[in-house]
Image (tube, helix red, strand yellow):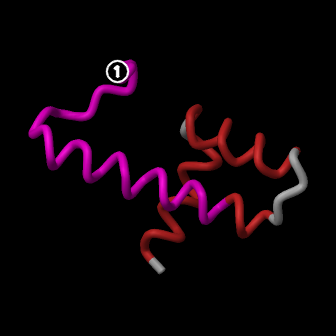
Amino acid sequence: AKLYVAALTASRWNKQAKAIYERLVAKGKAKKAALGAVMRKLVHLCFGVLKTRLPWDENYVATA
């Protein structure tokens, strides 16, 4: 439930999360499915911060 609320808030106020949410809804995904994608993205971002032990940087662009 806490991750759901975090994703709901992020999809409204965070530029990256909002872009993901709006893109998926525009493609015809259900709103809850798009919110699920935002939840997954938040989990991946949190894991990345814990794994690298670097502070969160909104402007960081990963290169693979």
Q: Position of residue 57 (x, y in %)?
A: 30, 26
Magenta-drawn stretch contains 38: yes
Left or right: 5, with 19 as reference point: left
Magenta-drawn stretch contains 41: yes
Left or right: 25, with 58 as reference point: right
Pick the residue in front: 2 or 50: 50
Q: Position of residue 48 (x, y in %)?
A: 25, 44
Number of marks drawn: 1
Pick the residue in front: 9 or 61: 61
In this view, which residue lies farthest toward the left? 53
Q: Which residues are magenta?
A: 35-64
Element type where label 1 sits in the image: loop
The structure residue drawn at horizontal position 43% and vertical position 53%, both measured from the top left corner, is 42
Q: For the C terminus, which image quadrant?
A: top left
Residue 55 in which image quadrant:
top left
Badge 1 amino acid:
Tyr
Q: Is residue 10 above or below residue 6?
A: above
Left or right: 57, with 19 as reference point: left
The structure residue drawn at horizontal position 72% and vertical position 69%, both measured from the top left corner, is 32
Residue under numbered circle 1: 60
